[in-house]
Image: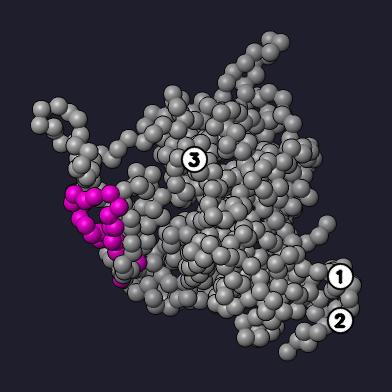
Amino acid sequence: MQNTDRLCMGCMNDNGGERLCPICGYDGQKPQPENALPTRSWIGEGRYLMGKVMEQNGEGITYLGWDNTSDTIVWIREYFPAGLCERLNSGGVRPLLGSEEAFQEGKATFLKLNQALSRLRELPCLLPVTDLFEGSGTVYCVKQAASGITLREFLLRNGGTLKWEQARPLFLPLLSALKALHNAGVVHRGISPDTLLVGRDGKIRLKDFLIPAARTARSDMTAQLYPGFAAIEQYGFDGQPGPWTDVYGFAATLFRVLVGNPPPEATERVTDDHMTIPAAVAQTLPRHVLSALANALQILPEDRTQSMDELREDLVPSADAGRDGKKKKPGGKRYGLIAALTTAGVIVVVLTVLAMTVFRDDLFPTHGTSSGLQPPSMGSAGNAMPDESSEKLYSVPNILGQTFAQLTGNIEYQDIYEFEIVSESYNDTQPRGAVYEQSPAEGTTVSKGTKIQVRISLGPSVVALPPLVGLTREAAYIQLLEMGFMPGAVQFYEKYDASKPANTVVEVDPGEGTQLNPESGVKLFVNSFVAPPSQPETTTTSRSIVVTEPPTTTTEPATTTKPSTTTTKPSTTTTKPSTTTSHSSSSSEPEEE
């Protein structure tokens, strides 16, 4: 067992007990931020040692920590909503007078969110939840520490942008992980370069899951929003957050990676929706990628790409897509992406995402009443005036096949119905995560505020193992999860095969086609062969699109609800993150330059 007296509270490495750490430079006598637990505090019945504060926001505090049971570095999240509670001398947490209800409601939501994440701890692209417990008046969530730097830091160190050929293998696996999260009812609401970690293995991982109130303006908590990456519904405008909110954050992040600038803040785009892409960038991007960004960055939630599946289809068009790779969106919406201008006799094309929004008389119209609204009763004189003494009634819609996240985020439902999950069980007619039974039934006439109880499908009770050999570890795992297999049922083993690509499945037990219950165990044997480091890509894609001179490149704003005005111009050099697996010890936090 590690002698914790010798650990540095800034990196959790054994530095011999020195005050100034020779490894990371942390001063052992440096005070913690206000309201944080002192360094070397113990929680969890003496299991976890608290180190320095890594992050503090409206929901709580994240500490660097040490698990004294497993002798590993961890990240510990403490529920401590600023302005709703206070720190006691004992180290405990107590809600402020008058804030008890908001504090307890947030605490319950924090617990529920991290319970859901703990059930998905094996999902690629996430930091696994290893422990969750209540104590000292609050809740603590422990996650496995990860080595790497934020995507924001990675871009600033490596020329500011990536090519689509470099970004694609980084971001597409994240789409699958987000789909699995959404099926489980979890929406991140904060996807940005600051919440994505680029690991030493060249993979992206999503961090900083917060409860909804901490990602929504005008709530009881101080909201942490990332200007340029937060969707308009998070600012308190019309529309409820849902999977489409993560679609916006993902697309805005990809826009930043490819272009070098984040999109303007959503609140600015309401009145001046102007985004441009430099000529040098547009010439290297496939048209279907530009179209996918346009669809996913729509201001209004109902106009936006609705799910990660749709976004994947746009980014990786199928064989039946148009000749130019652009998928046709239903509804006849107009997406004017390219405007031609003539300057000094030269035809110049300006790529604008300004015209992505549908032309409307009012960007935020008042939503009409539900189609199920009963007509008002006629007065005794036969006029059409409603009887204000009568209650408006609504017809229950058919919600079978929808996910719970879709129901709670549906704009038409939000002011009429409440939804409650009463059970989850196997069902052969609906996919995992979808509603297979509802009460009251479709067409029932109910009053406003009626609670609709739903039963959620866990997928079929028996499924056939698909062909998994040749897939990457992550792709195989996600496919099994989407079929309904339990996260704990999938076990990984290493098997060396120099004739097969690294990190791919070389054997599955039981074999392809075997009929199994999703709770049954599946063994995936992953190739432990490590390929030699690949050379940086030097090829470029030639495009015929000519665009106006590049606008001034700006770095994304800092983590705040107010956009930064600082502008810089990044280098045009881009690098591709290494895919070589590193066997060095895990770092506790992003690396310093």
- Residue that carries the numbered disc 3 in the rendered image: 237
Chain-order first, disc 1 or disc 3:
1
Disc 1 element: loop
Where does the image place residue 43, in percent across and percent down from the top left?
A: 65, 80
Looking at the rendered image, the quarter that the C terminus falls into is bottom right
In the rendered image, residue 413 lying in the magenta stretch gets the answer no
Above or below, 194 against 4 in this view is: above
Q: Is residue 130 left or right of residue 328?
A: right
Disc 3 element: loop
- Which mark lies nearer to you, 1 or 3? 3
* Nearest the eye: 385 or 181: 385
Q: Is residue 104 visible?
A: yes
- Residue that carries the numbered disc 1 in the rendered image: 27
Q: Residue at x 25, y 59 (%)?
A: 438
* Nearest the eye: 498 or 332: 332
Q: Residue at x 54, y 32 (%)?
A: 270
Q: The residue under label 2 is which amino acid type?
A: Gly
